[in-house]
Image (cartoon, helix red, strand yellow):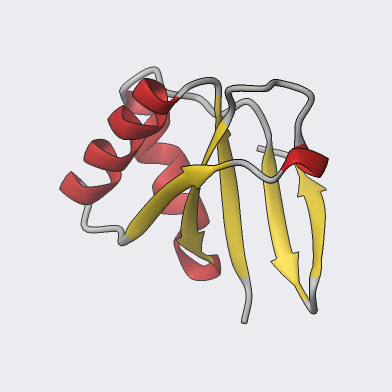
Amino acid sequence: MEYYLILARSVTYAQRMQKTLDRAGIRCRIFRAPRDLTDLGCAYAVQIAAADLSLALTALHRQALDPIRIFLYQRGVYREVGG
């Protein structure tokens, strides 16, 4: 299973991202970001399907909700990707 994690600086920011993605028809879920992916103690992650990244980034950018970092989860490993 492949998916992307879009990191947000706080739970409030992640919730705003979730609402924006929901309005764009993109399924997602939020949770606390894995510790090994961020040095920010309060970071949260928004998980989306791999196929939805481009549309998700466009929707988030339109609302000035640009992510801190983006990771692809593939074959049991997280790999940072550019946004």
Identify the residue at horizontal 16%, vertical 46% (top origin).
Answer: 23
Asked whether, in this view, residue 61 is left or right of residue 20, the answer is right
Vertical side of 16 occupied by 32: above or below: below
Asked if residue 41 lies left or right of residue 60, the reply is right
How many numbered marks, from 0 up? Answer: 0
Residue nearer the viewer, 59 or 13: 13
In this rendered view, identify the residue nearer to me: 11 or 79. Answer: 11
* Above or below, comparing residue 32 to residue 9 in the picture: below
Q: Is residue 16 left or right of residue 5?
A: left
Task: Where is residue 20? Give x, y as percent.
Answer: 25, 37
- Residue 56: percent from left, percent from top: 41, 47
Residue 6 image offset from top left, x and y in percent: 56, 42
Q: Quadrant of residue 68?
A: top right
Q: Quadrant of residue 35?
A: top right
Where residue 52 appears, as percent x and y from the top left, is 44, 61
- Name the residue located 39 percent from the left edge and 23 percent from the top edge: 13
Quick check: 5 left or right of 15? right
**Residue at (65, 37) in percent of width and height:** 83
Q: Quadrant of the N terminus?
A: bottom right
